[in-house]
Image: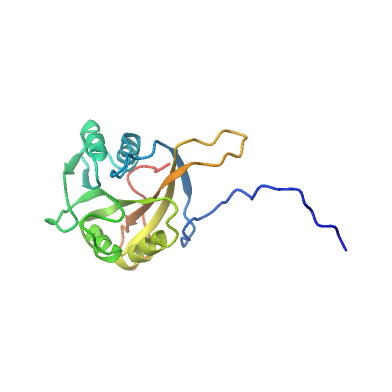
Amino acid sequence: MPMADNHHRPAPIPTGDVVSGDPPVPITVWPVPAPNRGETMSNAMGVRLVHNLTHPSDLVVDLTAGPQLARAVIAARRRSHLPVRPSGPAWRDATLIVTGWPPDPPTTPAVLLDRCRAGLLPGGCVAVLLPHGEVILPVDVIVAARTAGLAYLQHIVAADRPPLPGRHLHLDIHTDVLILTRSTTTQGSTTTQAGPADAG
């Protein structure tokens, strides 16, 4: 009988989806600071979302807590609805909608994401920011997104410390960002188009 191996081995680095996609979606690490208490994101996160997912003059809908996204929108010369609430007046022709989770005022993923799809231009994106460690909530959001006709495009993990080349470093992940997109074809089709810029 072989002897038991008592040497400690680190767990393998996870690859693939944190939340299963069909087909599997890429995972990107963004080294940005954690948000302050009561806010959705840091300034660096706001800048990255706006610059990676929009072009000048695009419309951004802000459903977040805190001024970070608004600052990024103004600095990048985008248009915006600021502030906007999920239960407020309807928006139209948005290229990017950004929301924290849970939303304020509270609503279900299905209600919010159905409204987001109705307000998006074809190829537009919804960025849903979730506190890292909520195991079930990302799955609920993905299921609701598919029901609303949104495709799961990318998973971004936001961490305080960036990974170092050649070293396996435990990341201080604080936020999961789910990027959803509206199909450029009719609802129910599996053909989608990425947002206006690479979310890498």
Q: Quadrant of residue 75?
A: top left
Residue nearest the viewer, comparing 60 with 139: 139
Which residue corresponds to the image point at 32% horizontal and 43% vertical from the top-left?
53
Q: Position of residue 57 (x, y in %)?
A: 20, 39
Work out which residue is located at the far right of the displayed protein and give it: 1
Vertical relation: 49 (above or below) 193: above
Q: Is residue 177 left or right of residue 103?
A: right
Residue nearest the viewer, comparing 111 with 170: 170
Which residue corresponds to the image point at 70% horizontal and 48% vertical from the top-left?
9
Q: Position of residue 62 (x, y in %)?
A: 22, 46
Work out which residue is located at the far top of the displayed protein and give it: 75
Q: Quadrant of residue 72?
A: top left
Regarding residue 187, the answer to whether it shows in the image is: no
For the N terminus, the quadrant is bottom right
Residue nearest the viewer, comparing 190 with 172: 172
What's the image's color scheme?
rainbow
Q: Quadrant of residue 33?
A: top left
Regarding residue 110, the answer to whether it shows in the image is: yes
Q: Position of residue 79 (x, y in %)?
A: 18, 40
Vertical relation: 155 (above or below) 142: above
For the C terminus, the quadrant is top left
Which residue corresponds to the image point at 39% horizontal and 43% vertical from the top-left?
199
Q: Is residue 167 left or right of residue 157?
A: right
Which residue corresponds to the image point at 43% horizontal and 47% vertical from the top-left?
156
Vertical relation: 129 (above or below) 46: below
